[in-house]
Image (tube, rainbow, N blue to C red):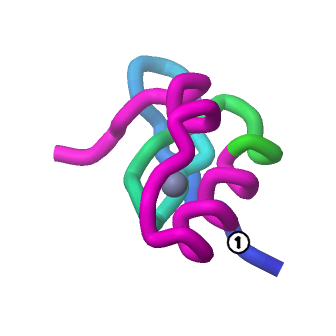
Amino acid sequence: MIMVKTVKRGGKTYNVCEACDYGYLDEETARACEAWCTKHKSCNLEITKKGEYLGD
Ligand SMILES: [Zn+2]
């Protein structure tokens, strides 16, 4: 089972995809993103549009 990393930003807690640094408010979406990113080595725009980029 993938452990989703969490990051606090602006008073919200995001579940972060460690592959692409997108954060999601729900863990389910973060897991879906991480599963996609790890498998396809790229992001799924349908997933990332639900989150926010938390990288530098
Ligand atoms: Zn991702």
Quadrant in which residue 10 is drawn: top left
Quarter holding the N terminus is: bottom right
Quadrant in which residue 25 is drawn: top right
Q: Which residue is mark 1?
A: 3
The correct choice, above or below, for 46 with respect to 55 in the image is: above
The correct choice, above or below, for 3 with respect to 15 in the image is: below
Going 45% across and 43% down the picture, which residue do you hit?
Answer: 22
Going 45% across and 70% down the picture, which residue do you hit?
Answer: 41
Apparent side of residue 50 relative to residue 10 in the rendered image (left or right)? right
Q: Is mark 1 within 8 Å of ligand 1?
A: no
Say few, some or many: other residues with alpha carbon within 10 Å of mark 1 (under 14 / 14 to 19 / 20 or more). few
Kind of residue at badge 1: Met
Quadrant in which residue 20 is drawn: bottom left
Q: Secondary structure at mark 1?
A: loop
Quarter holding the C terminus is: top left
Nearest the viewer among 53 and 7 is: 53
Q: Is residue 8 magenta?
A: no
Q: Position of residue 40 (x, y in %)?
A: 54, 69
The correct choice, above or below, for 13 with respect to 49 in the image is: below
Q: Is residue 41 magenta?
A: yes
Q: Residue furthest top?
A: 10
Magenta highlight range: 30-56
